[in-house]
Image (cartoon, helix red, strand yellow):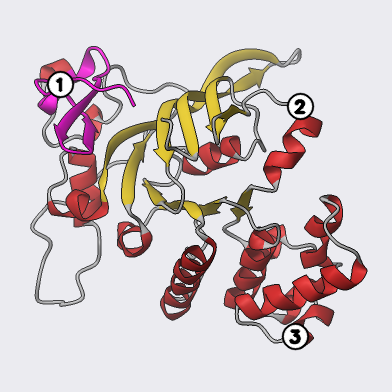
């Protein structure tokens, strides 16, 4: 943990479900349920899973847009889990977020120059002239012309708007950026441009990324390690190449089999996954994946499996590997 820039330990985010005239809490939506992960300086950790598994909620907890129900978030050895908004302000400079839909996250009434200058004003960085030069520098870093500063978000394409979102995220020279599906709404050709931009900025600024996506083929291109999330829990973590070469969890194998094969004459060797993600309000007993698992055993519906070590730096939460040494992440 000492070398980690970010350490998340046993994090939970349970949203109350209220019903009736008195709006009493009748249940909880367990969007994030006992998640632990680490990210080192300059590293990219990919986080993948189907829609509704809690990936974006986890990202928003890390940047403290949500206040977690329990658990701990440590950034650079400092516990930021329960800091007040005033105490959290210095850390927001170092932890930024890129959102999935830039049009929704950019203020349509502000010019691009105002949008990029705003974080500098909030954190009291530089005078007007210095801030203006920084805005010009940011536009250049993300490949946009200087004249963009006087234009408005609706005047740009989706890929250009995402470049503006990236420019805003790096304005304060952060150390960690949460990328919440930053390319899922873009055309394939534009996706590669944005991914290459993120990789370039990471090398130049030594950025660490938590890269959230539902497409494993996209995550493989950018990630050093990958964590697979299902119904609020991490079920497998491994180095990127190792995860693709020898996935240990049946859910991971199913996600990999869903990656499109460019050659129409070839078929994926693994069966695709059927069914839908269960409700996080009333999750299945034991391993939450067992109702959909092609390798399900009777014991899968019992106690939830612990994290086990299947190889060096390769961890899985599955009873098929329960004979492996247990590990707490």
How far apart in space, not on screen, are marks 1 and 3 (Cα)?
Answer: 56 Å
Q: Residue at x 76, y 71 (%)?
A: 134
Mark 1 or mark 3: whose residue is earlier in sequence:
3
The reply to whether dot 1 and dot 2 touch (C-beta < 8 Å) is: no
Q: Which residue is mark 1?
A: 325
Callout 1: few (<14), some (14-19), or many (20+) C-alpha neighbours within 10 Å?
A: few
Residue at (72% x, 16% y) in the render: 23
Numbered badge on residue 84: 2
Quadrant of the frame with the N terminus: top left
| Circle 1 SS class | loop
Which callout, 1 or 2, points at the residue further toward the start of the chain? 2
User: In this image, 219 relative to 265: left or right?
Assistant: right
Quarter of the C terminus within the rendering? top left
**Residue 146: assigned label:** 3
Residue nearer the viewer, 215 or 71: 71
Indicate the position of residue 275 as horizontal and vertical percent values: 28, 41
Q: Residue at x 47, y 42 (%)?
A: 55
Q: Residues within 10 Å of mark 3 (few under 14, many from 20)?
A: some
**Depth check, front residue: 137 or 212:** 137
x then y, percent, for residue 119 = 79, 56
SS at circle 2: loop
Residue 111 in view here: no
Q: Is residue 21 above or below residue 159?
A: above
| Distance in Å between CA atoms under marks 2 and 3 | 37 Å
Residue depicted at 55% across the width and 36% down the height = 76
Which of the numbered marks, if any, corresponds to residue 291? none
Q: Which residues are magenta?
A: 300-329
Please check the rendered image and state whether residue 318 is part of the magenta-colored stretch, yes or no.
Answer: yes
């Amino acid at each position: 943990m000492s070398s980690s820039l970010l350490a998340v330990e046993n994090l939970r985010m349970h949203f109350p479900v209220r019903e009736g005239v008195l709006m009493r809490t009748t249940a909880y939506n367990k969007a994030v349920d006992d998640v632990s992960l680490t990210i080192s300086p300059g590293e990219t950790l990919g986080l993948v899973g189907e829609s509704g598994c809690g990936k974006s909620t986890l990202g928003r907890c890390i940047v403290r847009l949500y206040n977690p129900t329990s658990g701990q978030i440590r950034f650079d050895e400092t516990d930021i889990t329960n800091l007040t908004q005033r105490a959290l302000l210095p850390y927001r400079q170092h932890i930024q977020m890129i959102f999935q839909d830039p049009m929704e996250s950019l203020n349509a009434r502000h010019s691009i120059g105002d949008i990029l200058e705003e974080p500098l004003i909030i954190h009291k960085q530089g005078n007007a002239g210095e801030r203006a030069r920084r805005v010009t520098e940011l536009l250049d870093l993300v490949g946009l012309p200087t004249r963009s500063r006087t234009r408005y978000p609706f005047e740009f394409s989706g890929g250009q708007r995402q470049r503006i979102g990236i420019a805003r995220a790096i304005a304060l020279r952060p150390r960690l950026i949460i990328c919440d599906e930053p390319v899922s709404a873009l055309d394939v050709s534009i996706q590669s441009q944005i991914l290459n931009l993120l990789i370039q900025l990471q090398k130049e600024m030594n950025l660490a990324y938590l890269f959230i996506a539902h497409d494993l083929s996209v995550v493989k291109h950018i990630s050093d390690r990958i964590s697979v999330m299902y119904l609020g829990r991490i079920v497998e973590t491994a180095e990127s190449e190792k995860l693709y070469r020898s996935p240990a969890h049946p859910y991971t194998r199913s996600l990999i089999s869903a990656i499109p094969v460019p050659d129409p004459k070839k078929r994926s060797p693994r069966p695709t996954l059927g069914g839908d993600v269960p409700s996080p309000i009333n999750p299945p007993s034991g391993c939450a994946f067992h109702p959909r698992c092609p390798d399900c055993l009777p014991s899968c519906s019992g106690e939830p499996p612990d994290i086990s070590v299947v190889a060096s730096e390769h961890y899985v939460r599955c009873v098929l590997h329960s004979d492996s040494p247990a590990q707490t992440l």
